[in-house]
Image (cartoon, grey):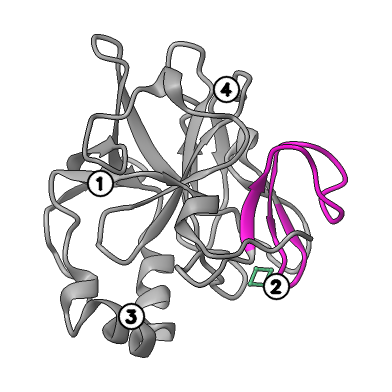
Amino acid sequence: MLAAGRRVAHAGDFSNFSKVRLTDAQGAPLKASALTSEEAYVFHFPFRSIPCFLINLGKRASGPQAMTSEGGDFTWPGGVGKDGNIVSYMAVCSHQLSFPGKEGSVIRYASKGSEIAGKNGMIVCCAHASVFDPAIGAKRVHGEATDPLVTVRLEYDAKDDGLYATGLSGLHLVERFFNVHKRSLIAEYGPGVYRESVGESSPAVPLSKYAASVSNC
Ligand code: FES
Protein backbone atom coordinates (compact mmCIF):
# COMPACT_ATOMS: atom_id res chain seq x y z
CA MET A 1 0.00 0.00 0.00
CA LEU A 2 1.21 3.50 -0.82
CA ALA A 3 2.30 5.78 1.96
CA ALA A 4 -0.56 8.22 2.37
CA GLY A 5 1.98 10.93 3.09
CA ARG A 6 0.61 14.28 2.06
CA ARG A 7 -1.77 12.91 -0.51
CA VAL A 8 -4.90 14.99 -0.44
CA ALA A 9 -7.50 13.29 -2.61
CA HIS A 10 -8.30 11.84 -5.96
CA ALA A 11 -10.01 14.67 -7.81
CA GLY A 12 -11.09 14.33 -11.41
CA ASP A 13 -8.52 12.42 -13.42
CA PHE A 14 -5.61 13.09 -11.10
CA SER A 15 -4.40 12.01 -7.69
CA ASN A 16 -3.75 15.26 -5.87
CA PHE A 17 -0.90 15.90 -3.45
CA SER A 18 0.05 18.95 -1.42
CA LYS A 19 1.89 21.14 -3.84
CA VAL A 20 5.66 20.91 -3.94
CA ARG A 21 7.77 23.83 -5.07
CA LEU A 22 10.53 22.97 -7.53
CA THR A 23 13.93 24.44 -6.69
CA ASP A 24 17.44 24.41 -8.05
CA ALA A 25 20.12 22.22 -6.50
CA GLN A 26 20.82 24.87 -3.82
CA GLY A 27 17.18 25.12 -2.80
CA ALA A 28 16.40 28.45 -4.50
CA PRO A 29 13.01 28.57 -6.26
CA LEU A 30 13.33 27.43 -9.85
CA LYS A 31 12.46 29.99 -12.54
CA ALA A 32 10.59 28.50 -15.48
CA SER A 33 12.21 30.95 -17.87
CA ALA A 34 15.68 29.81 -16.76
CA LEU A 35 15.22 26.16 -17.77
CA THR A 36 17.37 24.92 -20.61
CA SER A 37 15.59 23.13 -23.45
CA GLU A 38 18.68 21.00 -24.12
CA GLU A 39 17.86 18.26 -21.62
CA ALA A 40 15.41 17.17 -18.93
CA TYR A 41 15.75 17.99 -15.24
CA VAL A 42 15.21 15.29 -12.61
CA PHE A 43 13.27 15.94 -9.41
CA HIS A 44 11.39 13.65 -7.01
CA PHE A 45 7.65 13.74 -6.43
CA PRO A 46 5.45 12.93 -4.59
CA PHE A 47 7.63 10.38 -2.79
CA ARG A 48 11.35 10.59 -2.14
CA SER A 49 12.29 7.80 -4.53
CA ILE A 50 10.01 8.63 -7.46
CA PRO A 51 12.04 10.36 -10.20
CA CYS A 52 10.28 12.77 -12.53
CA PHE A 53 11.35 14.66 -15.62
CA LEU A 54 10.82 18.41 -15.94
CA ILE A 55 11.12 19.44 -19.58
CA ASN A 56 11.27 22.77 -21.38
CA LEU A 57 10.06 21.77 -24.85
CA GLY A 58 11.34 25.00 -26.36
CA LYS A 59 7.91 25.36 -27.98
CA ARG A 60 4.29 25.36 -26.88
CA ALA A 61 2.97 21.88 -26.01
CA SER A 62 -0.18 20.66 -27.68
CA GLY A 63 -3.52 21.47 -26.06
CA PRO A 64 -5.32 19.14 -23.63
CA GLN A 65 -5.52 15.56 -24.88
CA ALA A 66 -7.67 12.59 -23.93
CA MET A 67 -5.27 9.84 -22.86
CA THR A 68 -5.75 6.14 -22.21
CA SER A 69 -3.54 4.29 -19.76
CA GLU A 70 -3.48 1.18 -17.62
CA GLY A 71 -4.33 3.35 -14.62
CA GLY A 72 -7.48 4.73 -16.26
CA ASP A 73 -8.35 7.36 -18.82
CA PHE A 74 -7.44 10.95 -18.09
CA THR A 75 -7.17 14.33 -19.76
CA TRP A 76 -3.63 15.53 -20.20
CA PRO A 77 -3.69 19.25 -19.33
CA GLY A 78 -0.98 20.51 -21.72
CA GLY A 79 2.06 22.62 -20.89
CA VAL A 80 2.47 25.40 -18.31
CA GLY A 81 4.60 28.53 -18.13
CA LYS A 82 4.03 31.78 -19.96
CA ASP A 83 4.62 30.03 -23.29
CA GLY A 84 2.92 26.73 -22.39
CA ASN A 85 6.21 24.96 -23.00
CA ILE A 86 6.92 23.28 -19.65
CA VAL A 87 5.79 19.69 -19.05
CA SER A 88 6.54 16.96 -16.53
CA TYR A 89 6.27 13.17 -16.34
CA MET A 90 7.31 10.38 -14.04
CA ALA A 91 10.74 9.33 -15.35
CA VAL A 92 9.77 5.68 -15.08
CA CYS A 93 9.28 3.78 -18.33
CA SER A 94 5.77 2.38 -18.64
CA HIS A 95 7.18 -0.81 -20.17
CA GLN A 96 9.51 -2.38 -17.58
CA LEU A 97 10.07 0.54 -15.22
CA SER A 98 13.55 1.69 -16.23
CA PHE A 99 14.39 4.94 -14.46
CA PRO A 100 17.29 7.34 -13.95
CA GLY A 101 19.63 6.44 -11.09
CA LYS A 102 22.78 8.08 -9.79
CA GLU A 103 24.92 5.50 -11.62
CA GLY A 104 23.26 5.94 -14.97
CA SER A 105 20.10 6.33 -16.98
CA VAL A 106 18.74 4.50 -20.01
CA ILE A 107 15.83 6.94 -20.27
CA ARG A 108 16.27 10.57 -21.35
CA TYR A 109 14.76 13.52 -23.18
CA ALA A 110 16.50 13.68 -26.56
CA SER A 111 16.09 17.36 -27.48
CA LYS A 112 18.31 17.03 -30.52
CA GLY A 113 17.02 13.69 -31.72
CA SER A 114 18.23 10.14 -31.34
CA GLU A 115 18.72 7.07 -33.45
CA ILE A 116 15.58 5.31 -32.21
CA ALA A 117 13.37 8.42 -32.16
CA GLY A 118 14.34 9.62 -35.62
CA LYS A 119 13.33 13.19 -34.74
CA ASN A 120 13.96 15.87 -32.14
CA GLY A 121 12.25 16.31 -28.81
CA MET A 122 11.23 12.78 -27.85
CA ILE A 123 11.69 10.88 -24.59
CA VAL A 124 13.56 7.67 -25.40
CA CYS A 125 14.05 4.55 -23.31
CA CYS A 126 17.04 2.60 -24.57
CA ALA A 127 16.16 -0.54 -22.56
CA HIS A 128 13.81 -1.78 -25.29
CA ALA A 129 13.70 1.16 -27.68
CA SER A 130 10.47 2.86 -26.62
CA VAL A 131 9.75 6.46 -27.66
CA PHE A 132 7.29 8.90 -26.06
CA ASP A 133 6.22 12.36 -27.23
CA PRO A 134 6.41 14.84 -24.32
CA ALA A 135 4.58 17.53 -26.32
CA ILE A 136 1.49 15.29 -26.48
CA GLY A 137 1.12 13.82 -23.00
CA ALA A 138 4.16 11.50 -23.36
CA LYS A 139 2.05 9.18 -25.45
CA ARG A 140 3.89 6.16 -26.79
CA VAL A 141 5.17 6.72 -30.32
CA HIS A 142 6.78 3.32 -30.86
CA GLY A 143 8.68 0.55 -29.11
CA GLU A 144 7.81 -2.10 -26.55
CA ALA A 145 5.83 0.20 -24.27
CA THR A 146 2.09 0.51 -24.84
CA ASP A 147 1.16 3.09 -22.21
CA PRO A 148 2.06 6.77 -22.00
CA LEU A 149 4.32 7.91 -19.17
CA VAL A 150 2.51 9.05 -16.03
CA THR A 151 1.86 12.80 -16.16
CA VAL A 152 2.98 15.03 -13.31
CA ARG A 153 0.55 17.93 -13.13
CA LEU A 154 2.34 21.26 -12.79
CA GLU A 155 1.17 24.63 -11.53
CA TYR A 156 2.82 27.83 -12.72
CA ASP A 157 3.00 31.02 -10.65
CA ALA A 158 3.36 33.93 -13.06
CA LYS A 159 4.18 36.31 -10.18
CA ASP A 160 7.57 34.76 -9.57
CA ASP A 161 7.92 32.46 -12.61
CA GLY A 162 7.80 29.53 -10.15
CA LEU A 163 6.79 25.92 -10.71
CA TYR A 164 4.97 23.49 -8.46
CA ALA A 165 4.11 19.79 -8.80
CA THR A 166 0.60 19.05 -7.60
CA GLY A 167 -0.58 15.63 -8.80
CA LEU A 168 -0.14 12.45 -10.81
CA SER A 169 -2.32 11.02 -13.57
CA GLY A 170 -2.16 7.61 -11.93
CA LEU A 171 -0.69 5.71 -9.00
CA HIS A 172 -0.64 2.29 -10.68
CA LEU A 173 2.96 2.73 -11.84
CA VAL A 174 4.10 4.02 -8.43
CA GLU A 175 2.88 0.86 -6.76
CA ARG A 176 4.56 -1.34 -9.37
CA PHE A 177 7.77 0.70 -9.09
CA PHE A 178 7.87 0.20 -5.32
CA ASN A 179 7.24 -3.53 -5.68
CA VAL A 180 9.73 -4.18 -8.47
CA HIS A 181 12.57 -2.01 -7.12
CA LYS A 182 11.94 -2.48 -3.40
CA ARG A 183 15.30 -4.03 -2.60
CA SER A 184 17.40 -1.37 -4.31
CA LEU A 185 15.17 1.45 -2.98
CA ILE A 186 15.65 0.21 0.58
CA ALA A 187 19.40 0.02 -0.01
CA GLU A 188 19.51 3.60 -1.32
CA TYR A 189 16.98 5.36 0.92
CA GLY A 190 16.43 3.08 3.89
CA PRO A 191 13.42 0.95 4.90
CA GLY A 192 10.22 2.96 4.54
CA VAL A 193 12.10 6.14 3.68
CA TYR A 194 11.69 5.58 -0.04
CA ARG A 195 7.89 5.88 0.44
CA GLU A 196 8.04 9.14 2.39
CA SER A 197 6.73 12.31 0.80
CA VAL A 198 9.29 14.75 -0.53
CA GLY A 199 8.14 17.59 1.72
CA GLU A 200 7.41 21.12 0.60
CA SER A 201 10.10 21.45 -2.03
CA SER A 202 12.10 19.26 -4.38
CA PRO A 203 15.35 20.13 -6.18
CA ALA A 204 15.46 19.66 -9.95
CA VAL A 205 18.85 19.04 -11.54
CA PRO A 206 19.82 18.39 -15.17
CA LEU A 207 19.86 14.68 -15.99
CA SER A 208 23.51 14.92 -17.08
CA LYS A 209 24.40 16.07 -13.55
CA TYR A 210 22.04 13.67 -11.79
CA ALA A 211 23.23 10.46 -13.49
CA ALA A 212 26.89 9.50 -13.95
CA SER A 213 26.13 8.30 -17.47
CA VAL A 214 23.21 8.66 -19.86
CA SER A 215 22.56 6.12 -22.62
CA ASN A 216 22.63 7.50 -26.10
CA CYS A 217 20.42 5.33 -28.29
S1 FES B 1 11.85 -0.55 -19.92
FE1 FES B 1 11.70 1.12 -21.28
S2 FES B 1 11.36 0.20 -23.19
FE2 FES B 1 11.45 -1.49 -21.84
Give the residue pinned by disc 2: 127
Identity of the amino acid at label 4? Gly
In the displayed structure, would residue 162 be above or below residue 122? Answer: above
Q: Main secondary structure of the magenta part?
A: loop
Which image quarter is the C terminus in? bottom right
Label 4: how many Cα within 10 Å (few below 14, some 14–19, many 20+): few
Give the residue pinned by disc 3: 185
**Gap in angstroms between the C-alphas marked 1 and 3:** 18 Å
Q: 173 and 81: which one is in front?
A: 81
Q: Nearer the viewer, mark 3 or mark 4?
A: 3
Judged from the image, the secondary structure of the residue bearing numbered disc 4 is loop
**Gap in angstroms between the C-alphas marked 1 and 4:** 27 Å
Q: Which of the four quarters of the rendered structure image does ligand 1 lie in? A: bottom right
Does 2 appear in magenta?
A: no
Q: Label 2 CB, ligand 1: below 8 Å?
A: yes
Residue at horizontal 50 percent and vertical 62 percent from the top: 211
Judged from the image, the secondary structure of the residue bearing numbered disc 3 is helix
Q: Which mark sits nearer the N-terminus, 2 or 1?
A: 2
**Gap in angstroms between the C-alphas marked 2 and 1:** 27 Å
Q: Which mark sits nearer the N-terminus, 3 or 2?
A: 2
Label 3: how many Cα within 10 Å (few below 14, some 14–19, many 20+): many
Give the residue pinned by disc 4: 63
Judged from the image, the secondary structure of the residue bearing numbered disc 1 is strand
Residue at horizontal 56 percent and vertical 37 percent from the top: 66
Judged from the image, the secondary structure of the residue bearing numbered disc 2 is loop
Write down the quadrant of residue 29 in the picture: top left
